[in-house]
Amino acid sequence: MSPREKMINLMYIVLTAMLALNVSSDVLNGFSQVQDGLTRSNRTITARNQALYGQLQAFNEKNPEKGKVWLDKATQVVGETDRLYDYIDSLKLQIVRVADGEDGDVTNIRSRDNTEAASVVMLAPKGGKGKALKARIDQYRQYVTSFLEDPEKRKNLETALSTTPPKVAGVSMDQKKTWEETMFDNMPCIAAVTLLTKLQNDVRYAEGEVLNQMITNIDLGDLRVNLVNAFVVPDSRIVMRGTKYKAQIVLAAIDTTQRPTVYVNGHALANNNGIYEVGTGKAGKYDYSGWIEVLGRDGTVTRRDFKSSYTVIDPLATISATMMNVLYAGINNPISIAVPGVPQGSISATMTNGTLTKSGDGWVAHPTKVGAECVISVTAEMDGQRTSVGSTTFKVRKLPDPSPFITYKDANGQTNRFKGGKFSKALLMEARGLDAAIDDDLLNIDYKVVSFETVFVDAMGNGIPEVSNGAQFSERQKNRMRALQRGKFFLIRNVKATGPDGITRTISPMDVTVN
């Protein structure tokens, strides 16, 4: 207990003991002096509480976001305290008027030794106001102690506003008096008024403790800092010509003695510097989120969530031969389009003289008209806006002629292509016909053979032509091949083949020597 509480309780015990012996004029004068002292003390405490409330009002005017919640709570506490304080004032006045009449004055009590007035007002069966007072004190005690987090301060207020009757030695539970009987039964008028004034003093004391706590709570949750630095946080360090560079310049404050704990994707960082490092094994856009926890001065943990993203791009160097920007008409030409610093999902492109479509991580250009140019134009989404980032012009050419070949399988079962020269007769007889394709390591395009003819040389040196059955060897051609001796040859000519561009062309001949 504080020295003030000890002094008041000791004085209350001494005066009560004196009353039990004899209510002399000296004792009554002593109560008057205590009453005057408590009244002055109440005025002092009230003025102090008003000053505390004024601090909350002033802070709220400067910072309503932080101050309003505590000012609202303080206003409720002040209102509850004033109502209880005024109610006790009304009880004092009622007791004095029973003792001195309707013109009774609390500051000038004439019948100070009247021992009936307090009982009439405060105890049953007449006034019974003591029970109501006890209920209001109990309610007020529970209300104000709910604002105190310090168990010692809460205990002091519970003791100061306690309505538990004191234990008396030798008195059984059946004979034990209630709180209101202990306070006001057979109590002189001046003593009852003094006790009520002391109760008002306790109420103001409780109000002051709560207001002090609220002023402390305003900054209790704030984070302590001892180092302030300026930081530049750019949206990106890679900026494309024609776009805007954007950065947020902030003032950050930290406590070097207590580092916060940073969690990214649910896992705490291994370092206490807030540095997040992660490998970049694959290109693309990656999102991450987490939270920061820091311990406040009041022991509570403050959590702040965050989320961000980053884009990984492949190392990129664009190398092109300016004389070889060529597309072939009628086929799908694979195209690679990349913009440094921009993910593939944010890139779009169009072309003239044909169509351009997205295919996986690449593009497919399908030009239509041979001899005309086609232009591929690229746009990218950056900072929420579509921006043109460049264009390239291509020449459109007709596909080159394919080469004819005979498809066969070698001794290992692998498929191969015979394009002329010496060829096994056994493999020749197994072949079904003739194929054609462009397979020059740059293009790999199959053609459909429409027809061809073979020319065999007879014993007289005359050439004997035979016509195919479409892309297949005809039966007459097969018979001629069976009759060939080792070292003899025949010619395949007038090979007509149609490509994916729809053009049918006559391609180069090929000779076959039987091995």
Image (cartoon, grey):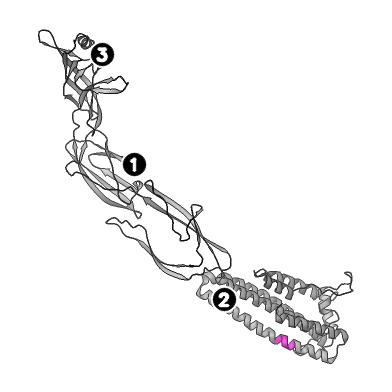
The residue to which callout 1 is attached is 361
Per the model, the C-alpha gap separating discs 2 and 3 is 107 Å
For mark 1, does the 10 Å Cα neighbourhood hold few (<14), some (14 to 19), or many (20 or more) residues?
few
Per the model, the C-alpha gap separating discs 1 and 3 is 46 Å
Q: Nearer the viewer, residue 473 or 515?
A: 515
Amino acid type for the residue under numbered disc 1:
Asp
The residue to which callout 3 is attached is 426
How far from the left and from the top, in percent, is residue 138?
74, 71
Amino acid type for the residue under numbered disc 2:
Leu
How far from the left and from the top, in percent, is residue 373?
19, 41
**Relative horizontal placement of residue 254, taking residue 501 as reference (left or right):** right
* Quadrant in the picture for residue 441: top left
Amino acid type for the residue under numbered disc 3:
Ala
Residue 155 among those drawn in magenta: no
Contact check, label 2 and label 3, Cβ < 8 Å = no
Q: Nearer the viewer, residue 218 or 284?
A: 284
Is 515 rendered above or below residue 138?
above
Q: For the magenta stretch, what is the residue range?
A: 35-39
Label 3 SS? helix
Looking at the image, is mark 2 or mark 3 nearer the viewer? 3
Label 2 SS? helix
Q: Earlier in the sequence, mark 2 or mark 3?
A: 2
The residue to which callout 2 is attached is 56
The N terminus lies in quadrant: bottom right
How far from the left and from the top, in percent, is residue 4?
71, 82
How far from the left and from the top, in percent, is residue 301?
56, 62
Residue 103 in sight:
no
Residue 298 in sight:
yes
* Quadrant in the picture for residue 34: bottom right
Q: Nearer the viewer, residue 226 or 247?
A: 226
